[in-house]
Structure formats: structure tokens, C-alpha cells
Amino acid sequence: MADLNAPVAADRALSSAEGAARAQEPIWDIIELLFFAYRDFIGDPDDVLAKLGFGRAHHRVLHFVNRNPGMKVAELLDILKITKQSLGRVLKQLIDQGYVVQKEGVNDRRQRLLYVTTKGESLAMKLAGLQTGRIARALSEMGPNAQDTARRFLTAVLNSEHRDAVLRFIARADRARRARG
Amino acid sequence: MADLNAPVAADRALSSAEGAARAQEPIWDIIELLFFAYRDFIGDPDDVLAKLGFGRAHHRVLHFVNRNPGMKVAELLDILKITKQSLGRVLKQLIDQGYVVQKEGVNDRRQRLLYVTTKGESLAMKLAGLQTGRIARALSEMGPNAQDTARRFLTAVLNSEHRDAVLRFIARADRARRARG
DNA sequence: GAGATATGTCAATATGGCTGACCTAAATGC
DNA sequence: GCATTTAGGTCAGCCATATTGACATATCTC
């Protein structure tokens, strides 16, 4: 670990002591760890999905619908930041194979509100469980307040314009889930 | 923030108190923050690359070649975990447009060692600078030891089988860079 | 010299993005 | 009540990035 920490200490000294005054030495370790960590983080679900003939796009849709049952198509597009044509293909497969259903909105009958089926919830929870296992293991290897620290770090990485929206989304989904039990 | 913290405290209580005894409640916040944070993290480079007609695949190649000049094609394939056919197309464009060059290995003349040109280094450093700016801002919003904490978290997220290899790669590239100055 | 290795390349295929055009049904506004 | 806007769907085509499989060439190793 000594060998590994040395350059990092140097980075930190540079970025805090010399600050924005000069071109900053890249923070290579975090840049690369984000790349490798995200790849592994996505990897477990990928394997399960591949066996079902699904990809990451299906995972994202299923995840967000499961987290936010009754979500409008437009909201999903907004979160995923893809076009409705791109969503269409993936969503159609999830619906045809019985993972997701659409229900007409009560107030606004143009809306096709999205819900996971039992089958869909089961898959979504299985995938979330894989990712949770990995994260729980990681957090347990750190000290106290690990989850809070990780959350603060990741939140700080967000574009500042997105931050509120992302945190609101998470808080709202959590409230809804607690309400459902 | 109170609204946001509440469910998280509940998660932590569950996962530490009840442990692996029952199916763990998903750690939704970290799962989703990883998704959103990684997307923003990748976003700045994406915009620059798009103007040059490049994509993420080009970024990855350029990044690792810049970090590890003289790298063998096989090493790059191993890090990126793609096939040589996939690499071929992207690498060819980077070479044709003067961002990367290949040199015959001295010991083994079958090898085509990869190097960034001045132009390639300049682009690689520009992209790394964007990501560094984001990360530096994020770290500065946290307490002391932020970089160390972030590194420990991300390292812990890695597949345990990959960890050593990833850390060795980072340490080796750092050493090489210090040696070059 | 035989066989293994490093790299490159051709061809076909899949996935998941995109743009642009156009459609229906329902809500909304004057 | 009719015009317009909105929510959503769909067709067609394009692009980037990945895959598998087969094969070619040069060079190294034994």
C-alpha cells in the first residue's frame, strides 16, 4: 500500500496547496477506479440479464419502473435521457415478456403508467440484490459512516444542476416504497 | 437533507443489525447515485469527443495508451476487455488521425507498442483534466482524507479477484509517469 | 523447421443509441 | 365546439460499438 499511496499524497498536496493556480495533475487513481469499479458494478446484473436475452437498457428500464411504480413514460425518458424510439424497443420486449405492464392514467387517459409485474419485480429485486451485495461488502470494509460518506462523494460528483433533481428522485422513491411497505 | 437521510439510516440499521440473516433491503441510494454520477463523470469528455467525431471507445484507448506509453496491443485488450476486432477499428482511427502511433518492439519485433503523439497526449490530458476538475470539486466538498476515502470505497467495489491487478496497474502507471516527469 | 505467439483483417451479426416523419387519442384553451 | 397541444406509439434508416469465426502474416521459441 505504501507504494500506492505515495503518488496520491503528492496529488493531494498539489491540488490543495497550488489549487487552481496551475493546471492540475490529473487524479488518475480515482478516474481509473471509477472506470473499473463501475464496470464490475454493472457486471453481475449483465450476466443474469444476458441469460434472459436482455441487456443494460432493459435493466435500466426495469430498475426505474420498479423503483417508481406508476411512472409516466415521459418521466422515464427524462431520467434515462434517451429518445422514445430507443425506449420503445426495449419497453416493448419487457411488456411482451410480462415484466412490465401499462395502465391508463385515471386523471389523464392519454398516459400509459408503467408498473412492474410480480415477475418484473422479482427480476428487478434480484438484480438490485446483486448490486447491493457488492456495495454492502464494500461499505463493510470501510469505517463507520461508510454509506453516508459514499453518498456524499457520489452526490458531489454529480453535475450541480442535476443534484437536486437526483436527490429528490431518490427521496421520493424511498418515501413511496416505505408507504407501500 | 433530513428527508433524504431518513431511509438511509433505516437501510444501515437493517444491514448491520440483521446482517446476512435475511434478504437485504437494496441500498437504493448508492446504486442510483453510481448510475447518475458515472453518467455525469463520462459526460464532459463525451461532449469534447463528439466534436472530434470520436466516442467513448476512443477515449478509453487514448486514456490507457497515454497512461501507459509503450503498452502492447494485448495488454490494452486485456484492460479494456474487448476483442481485437473491436479495438482495431477504433485504434485505426486514432492512428490515422495522428493521436496514436505504433512502434515495433525492440526485443520482440512482432509487437506493435502503442504511444500517444503530442496531439494525442494533449487530447488525453484535456479529457483527464475535465474529469479531474469534477473529482477535485467533489473531494473538496468532503472532509479531510477525501481522496483516500474515495479510493478505498471504489477499490472495495471492485471484484476481489481484480483488485490487485487494478491497483498494480495504477501504481505502475504512476511510477512510470513520475519517472518520465 | 515446426509450432506457438502477436497482431491484423474480412465478414456477418446484435444492441442500443440517434434523427425525422407521421399517427392516434385525449386534454385544454378560446 | 373546434383548434391546438400534449402523451404516447411507430416506421424507416443511420451510426457506434460490441460480438463470433475464420484466416493471414510476421516473428519468436524450441
Image (cartoon, coloured by chain):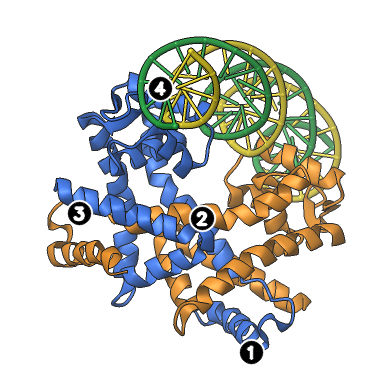
Chain colours: A orange, B blue, C yellow, D green
In screen coordinates, is B156 left or right of A32? right
Q: Which residue is mark 2?
A: A38
Residue at mark 3 shares a chain with residue at mark 4: no
The mark lying in front, picked from 2 and 4, is 4
Q: Which residue is mark 3?
A: A24
**Res. B122 visible in picture:** yes
Q: Left of B7 or right of it: where is B151?
A: left
Q: Earlier in the sequence, mark 3 or mark 2?
A: 3
**At label 3, which amino acid type do we have?**
Gln
Per the image, the residue denoted by label 1 is: B17
Q: Quadrant of residue A155?
A: bottom left
Residue D25: percent from left, percent from top: 44, 11
- Secondary-structure class at tag 2: helix
Q: Which residue is mark 4?
A: B92
Discs 3, 4 touching: Cβ within 8 Å: no
Q: Do the residues marked 3 and 1 share a common chain? A: no
Q: Amino acid at mark 4?
A: Lys
| Distance (Cα) linking label 1 and label 2 | 28 Å
Residue A56 rendering spot, x and y as whole percentages: 65, 47
Q: Chain of mark 1?
A: B
The residues tagged by marks 1 and 4 sit, at their Cα atoms, a distance apart of: 54 Å
